[in-house]
Each structure stands twice: as C-alpha cells, then as structure tokens.
Image (cartoon, helix red, strand yellow):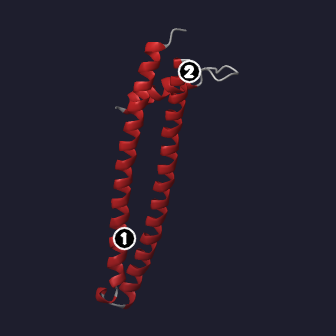
Amino acid sequence: MTKKFAKTLEEKANQLAAYPLKKQWDDSIPSMFRREIALTVDQIQRLRERHEEMFHSLLRLECYVDTDLMAMENRQQQYAAADNFPEMEQLKQRLFDIEKERRNLSLKLEEKTQNLETRLLELINRHQQLDIR
C-alpha cells in the first residue's frame, strides 16, 4: 500500500474505533468489527513504537562503535602501523553488522505493518458492508 493510502486507511480506522460505545458491551457485528479495528490500529501503533525504540538503540550502538573506531584511528596515526590494531577491523565489521541489523529490522517492520494494514482494510470493508446506522 502506498503511504498516503495507508494513512487514509488508518484515519478511517481511527474514526470507526472512536465510535461511541454503549455503556454495556455491544454484541452487534458492527461493534465487534469496530473493536477488532481498534485493536489492529493499536497493534500497528505499538509495532511502530517498538521498532522506533529498536532503531534508536541501534543508532546509539553505532555511535559508540564509531566513536571507538575514530579514537582508535587517531591512536593508530600517532603511534603504530595498522597491523597493530586488529580491533579496528572488528569495529568496522561491527558497523557493517549494525547496518545489516537495521536493514533486517526495517524489512520486518514493513512486512508486519503490511500484514496489519491488510487486516485493517479487510475489517473496515466488512464493517462497511454490515453497518446500517
């Protein structure tokens, strides 16, 4: 789905989820769909928040490794040849690993979000077919 369509879809879902509930638990089919829609919207939001935390954590780790690498490069220039610093290669490899993890995380987020958006669209369509306000 395009980002614009997904945003519109979520806005529609939020409207349906915000539909006022009665004081008692409503067992009507449209109400059941609205609850499922609300749950799916909440799952999408929590998924984004969790992945945002993970991306932030990866960025922080990348900064630490990069800082260590730059400090080591400065020491290398002052004191010794590159052969004396095998740790530099390990740090560089760690940066590549972090980037790989970031790509994998991004792909997982996209896949999970697409699945939830598809579910949301199905629920909204079913709700629209049944709702006779």
In the image, residue 93 lies at what x, y percent?
32, 72
Residue at 39 percent across and 53 percent down: it is 105
**The one of 91 and 26 positioned closer to us in this rendering:** 26
Q: Viewer-proximal residue, 104 or 22?
A: 22
Q: Residue at x 46, y 55 (%)?
A: 55
**Residue at label 1?**
94
Where is 81 relative to 93, above or below? below
Residue 26 rendering spot, x and y as whole percentages: 62, 20
Left or right placement of residue 133 versus residue 71 in this view? right
Residue behind mark 2? 31
Mark 1 crowdedness (10 Å alpha carbons): few <14, some 14-19, many ≥20: some
Q: Quadrant of residue 116?
A: top left
Q: Give the crowd class for mark 2: few <14, some 14-19, many >=20 residues within 10 Å.
A: many
| Secondary structure type for disc 2 | helix
Residue at x-position 56% and y-position 25%: 17
Identified by mark 1, the residue type is Arg
Task: Work out how far the residue at label 1 is from the one at label 2, CA to CA, in angstroms.
Answer: 50 Å
Please give left or right for residue 91 compared with residue 51 in the image: left
Task: Tell me the quadrant of the picture where the N terminus can be found.
Answer: top left
Image quadrant containing the C terminus: top right
Evaluate if marks 1 and 2 touch, with contact meaning CB atoms under 8 Å apart: no
Report the label total.
2
Locate residue 31: give its quadrant: top right
